[in-house]
Amino acid sequence: MNPDLLLRELLRRELLPRSSVMDGEIVIVSDNGHHRVVDRRGGQLFAVCGAEAVAWERVPYGAAEVRALLPEIVVDEDELLVLRTFDKGLDAVEHQRTVKRAVEWLPMMAGRALAQWHRAAAPLAGDVRLRRDLPPPFRPSPSAVAAPVAQAIARVAAEWRLSTIIHGDFSFERIFISSESDRRIHFAGWEDVRAGDAAWDVAGIIESYYAWSLDPNMVKAVDGPVTNIDGIALRNLVTSFWNAYAAALPPEEARPLLLRAFAYAGVRMLARIGRLMSKPESMPALTRMMQAAMAMLTTPAVVADAFLTPPPQAPPWPQAWMMMR
């Protein structure tokens, strides 16, 4: 269904106000049958079109005890699934752009909620509708990466564990925040949902904060980056997220998952580098991102320990980190 047909269908179902459509206040962002529909006067919908895509995105709703973390279903049909998130909510990039800082409460909230999701969804990981392949960043084009990098990615991929239902592309853009005062969140954009390794979702947040520290243009307003994240702030944000996520994990599970998450964050950062190649404002950060990605891919334990267990003074950041700062 193309955006024009979708708009007509949403109007027919009275899911959008005609006044907003007539005044040009509706924005639809589409990608392969997934549509984000924003009414700039308030209100947001996600529409999923096509039987296969609808089947995938229905699966997370089987975990009834965590449905509060998901947008509300307002249309549930074989070929069309329509979801409603917070009326004036923003994704985490847009929200932090609006408040012009890194939101201090978000990492703890996201870590706790993600852990809750992974625990609740684990019994559903055997659902036959779910994909079980590795996410696309594990399969870069041979022309896009050098052979040693491809080999490093393959070594990391060999550590993959199938443990629960994962979002598949968890990042700031997939977390919707009700408001700075309300502090409720939704996990949205489940088009890459699959049975897989919980560490991949954890890596999404670690990499998002790390990438922001290296490329402040990742979260910017009209007049430029809203804030820079220095080493201390980065460590505090990542530590807050991980501590909240790991609170319910047995120690024997927490450490291996953490190391896989940092290695996977390297894979995710390499994929980000590919997306940023066409953005002139981000070009100065690409070398530092490559150094960081390779450090996480090849020495995840060193990088993880530098983030989470530094000594009281002068933490010995990994060599790649030192080169970046």
Image (cartoon, rainbow, N blue to C red):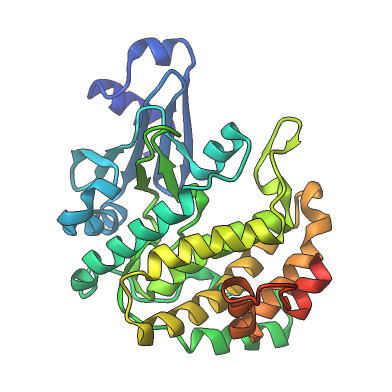
287 up-or-down from 31: above or below: below
Instruction: Give the tally of numbered discs.
Output: 0
Question: Image quadrant for the N terminus?
Answer: top left
Q: Quadrant of the C terminus?
A: bottom right
Comparing 55 with 292, the one in front is 292
Left of 215 or right of it: where is 25? left
287 up-or-down from 99: above or below: below
Q: Where residue 101 sits: x, y (%)?
A: 62, 41
Residue 222 in sight in this render? yes
Residue 246 sits in which quadrant?
bottom left
Taking depth in this image into account, of 18 and 109 the one nearest to the observer is 109
Residue 164, percent from left and from top: 29, 73
Displayed quadrant of residue 268? bottom right
Query: Would residue 102 appear left or right of 149 to someone viewing this image?
Result: left
Q: Residue at x 45, y 50 (%)?
A: 174
Question: Which residue is at a point 56% across and 73% down the rendered structure image?
Answer: 308
Which residue is depicted at the point 34% across and 33% down? 86
Evaluate whether residue 143 shows in this view: no
Q: Nearer the viewer, residue 21 or 52?
A: 21
Horizontal and vertical percent position of residue 152: 63, 86
From the top left corner, tell me how far across and down residue 165 is, in percent. 30, 68
Image quadrant where residue 274 sits: bottom right
In this view, the residue in front, 50 or 293, is 293
Q: Which residue is drawn at the image coordinates 60% and 79% (left, top)?
A: 305
Horizontal side, residue 80 vs residue 91: left or right: left
In this rendering, is residue 183 above or below 125?
Answer: above
